[in-house]
Image (spheres, grey):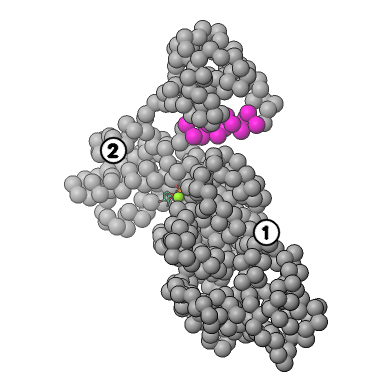
Amino acid sequence: MTNETWGQIREGLIHRVGKNNYTTWIEPLRLSQLRNGVARFEVPTSFFGDWVQRNYADQIRSQLVHAGAPVDRLEFEVGAEAPRPDSQVTDSRAAEARAPEARTAAPTARPAARRAAAEDDLPGAPLDSRFTFDSFVVGKPNELAHAAARRVAEGGPVTFNPLFLYGGVGLGKTHLMHAIAHDLRQNRPDLRVLYLSAEQFMYRFIQALREKQVMDFKSLFRSVDVLMVDDVQFIAGKDSTQEEFFHTFNALVDQNKQIVISADRAPGEIKDLEERIKSRLQCGLVVDLHPTDYELRLGILQQKVEYYRSQYRGLVIAPGVLEFLAHRITTNVRVLEGALTRLFAFASLVGREITLELTQDCLADILRASDRKLTIEEIQRKVAEHYNVRLSDLIGPKRLRTIARPRQVAMYLAKQLTSRSLPEIGRRFGGRDHTTIMHGVRKIEELAATDSQLADDLQLLKRLLQG
Ligand code: ADP
Ligand code: MG
């Protein structure tokens, strides 16, 4: 059998392994020898050979047998003509692949220590050791996200793919993803877990393009068991990165590998993200981290205080201080934490009890910022952006439905989210009469009761505006 005949035979594998996997793993294989029941292929790197051996050997063999070639074993050798400059990552993994037991053992049967060593090769971001499930306070706004993350962290069979976590900044998305990674490393050291931000994914990809190591990049990302990509909204509008992300995503889903994604908004709301990616992201479980409520904030503060007490001994907090903070700092958990850190540092420096008065002094700027009033202009700008209409049209006289509806939404939000009176709002909408504003507000209230798309829009906008 020649390499050309193999060229025809291998095409039968397209529908068995999928187009993506076919292009990445099957097409580059060159049949160099077929003798004594052994089919020998040339591959670009030994990692490549190892990967094909582990994942596609059976399919390739049966395809060959089907075509009349009596093959019972496949062998791979690194192509002699075009040795590729292996990256460090590929080198150490190639060394691993050459070890005799690694050749025959199934991936999951490999000893944990060996696997843990290989973990160092993964180009992931470092994990924050404080971001564990133990330190994550669960409340109504995040209970669903927490439960889903726990499920993934068990490392059992994949039940939903991907897990898509979204919500505003500082609500715990990164914390939950790190917690998943910590737990998996502890409980399932056999799994290759890769966590990184979408920005790092892009950076790696561009680097691979530049250094002509796209194949290594692909191999690496397709070889993980759990892939977590944080802040995926970052790749919106970055076309070649999106494309590569899409292929990586599909290849892993095809192999039934768990994927966890986070973003600052729902998949459908991410601008400049390709439709096919949006719809893929929506296929799994999409969970929303809601803005914190008072109880959750208080719970988080109480937990952090335990931690700070162990750091700054002898500190005393007057009753009511934590409640005051939970009540006043509503933006996000990161700000809340920052406030507490500063408060403790200050109090320990001056050696005073943390009273309400000291708190107000020490945190004056943070408290003032949290107090910030939302303006009608901000609402108008966000609404215009959301519906993709011009700000001048939103305020101006046009009566087109595509503009009039967003305008009414903005009126409604201005009434709901600010303390401005109807005449005041009217003035900001190009000098309209207060009855026009009232009509707009009522109209949206009515519609939102039956139109779920509109209700979703309102919810999203409120969330974006209130941070
Ligand atoms: P995001 O990725 O959603 O922007 P992070 O996960 O970085 O937010 O969280 C910001 C900070 O708030 C982190 O220090 C994190 O530990 C803390 N945090 C957020 N939610 C919680 C929670 N429910 N319990 C404890 N800490 C939390
Ligand atoms: Mg984050």
The crowding category of the residue bearing disc 1, from other C-alpha atoms within 10 Å (few below 14, some 14 to 19, many at least 20), is few
Residue type at tag 2: Leu
Residue 159, labelled with which disc?
Answer: 1
Q: Position of residue 48 (x, y in %)?
A: 57, 75
Q: Residue at x 29, y 57 (%)?
A: 311
Asked if ligand 1 lies within 8 A of label 1, the reply is no
Q: Give whichever of 434, 343 is nearer the camera.
A: 434
Q: Which residue is mark 2?
A: 363
Residue 70 vs residue 197: left or right? Answer: right
Figure check: 162 above or below 347 = below
Q: Residue at x 66, y 22 (%)?
A: 447
- Predominant SS along the magenta part: helix
Is residue 458 within the magenta segment?
A: yes
Q: Position of residue 291 (x, y in %)?
A: 50, 39
Residue type at tag 1: Thr
Which quadrant is home to the C terminus? Answer: top left
Q: Position of residue 86 (x, y in %)?
A: 46, 75
* Residues at marks 2 and 1, CA–CA distance in whole angstroms: 45 Å
Q: Looking at the rendering, which quadrant does residue 74 occupy?
A: bottom right
Residue 138 appears in the picture as rendered: no
Q: Give whichever of 324, 56 is nearer the camera.
A: 56
Q: Residue at x 45, y 15 (%)?
A: 428
Figure check: 161 above or below 66 = above
